[in-house]
Amino acid sequence: MPKAAKFPFPIRKTASSRSVEARKSQPLFSKPAIHSDRLPDPGLTPPVLDPDAPQHLPSLIKYILQNTFDDVPDRSAGMGSERISEILRFRDGLPPIVSLAHVFALSQSATQTEREMARLVAAGTVRKIVIPGRGKSGGLVGEGLVLVDDWIARVKGAAGLTHETGEKYIALLHAKRGEFSTTTSSFTTDEVRELVTHGFLTSPTSLSSSSQPSSLLAPKSAASSLATAGSTFTTGTLAAIGGSNAITASGGSGSTLLASARPSNNISYNTMTFSLPNTGAYLKLQTTARAHLHFLLRQISPAHREASNDLLREKWNGNTIAPGDAAANAKKARGESSAVLPGRTKRWREFWGTRYEWVLAEAVGSGGVECFDTGAVGLGVRAR
């Protein structure tokens, strides 16, 4: 047999052959990097979430309200004037409520905060408000705190509310300092209807007939709501059997049930609950933001649902470009950066520019996540 020809020099591979081999060695779809290793947890005491937060309760409430959102960037935000106007209107319309969980998350002494809260509620400086609903992450939304001055300012600034009705309502706030509900015997039927329309009074049965506001999470079907009511609500309550409209939702006539229903604590029909307008919008922002924080933890570490605080903040902010960062903007113009403008991120599209620190405190206070000192990469955040 003839021998194979020997070449005096090695055959040089062409560029096309190298590119073919490179493509064969690479996967078709690149997967995002997943952190499979656990963060070190030596058991050190975690630092305070916000060391700059004041501990005087009225000052702490104002501090939380002022640090809920980031300022809208002046330029290079990726948002038009109409969207910026929409964001500002949404923020102005939110009620001045601070969740009790958020207050305890930032307070350095829960006992001292409890004592000060009881004293200020009795003095008429702070009011407690019942927030109807449950968080999507499993934690109760529970109660909130409102400065009485902010509450009165909302009443006086309500468009369409008559001066006489507003003054009678403010007098009732001062008379019922530590109470959630009040009788409406001092109001006429038109005044009660006016206060309910503006969102300053609500029926107490609405707090127990559903676990979430209708704007947040509507039940998939009447059958599903009836099936889950017994395991969700307290035994013996009207909500445990599907609420006051259970028969109507199932397709039957519920007039008899509604006529015979009476709250368990003998509340009369002219009893209403103090409330603030747009509480549902606040509740939706709170629950969806906490749910998204849990989603980011699962995305970063599916096995352990934990991440460093810096990495979690970067994910929440959406890897944005600061408007004044000339180097980052130059890299983006050359196509060397994967960062996006703030207006294109989920934080601004769905959460109206909510700060990461605000969401983290809400999640920690509600018990959905916990913080720990890694001793190596700073603060760590872990879902419970």
Image (cartoon, rainbow, N blue to C red):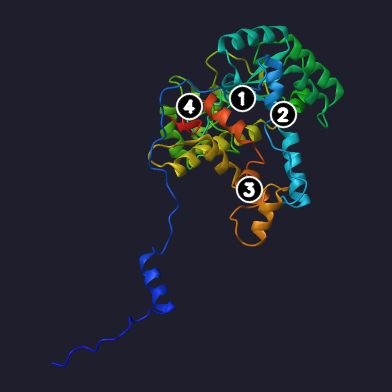
Nearest the viewer among 300 and 120 is 300
Please report whichever mark, 2 or 4, sits nearer to the chain's N-terminal start. Answer: 2
Secondary-structure class at tag 2: helix
Determine which residue is flagged by label 2.
66
Residue 50's label in the rendered image is 1
Q: Is residue 84 left or right of residue 26?
A: right
Residue 373's label in the rendered image is 4
**Distance between mark 1 and mark 4 Cα atoms:** 14 Å
Contact, mark 2 vs mark 4 (Cβ under 8 Å): no
Determine which residue is flagged by label 3.
320
Give the x, y percent position of residue 268. Answer: 62, 15
Q: Residues within 10 Å of mark 2 (few under 14, many from 20)?
A: few
**Distance between mark 2 and mark 1 Cα atoms:** 14 Å
Q: Residues within 10 Å of mark 1 (few under 14, many from 20)?
A: few
Please report whichever mark, 4 or 3, sits nearer to the chain's N-terminal start. Answer: 3
**Distance between mark 2 and mark 4 Cα atoms:** 27 Å
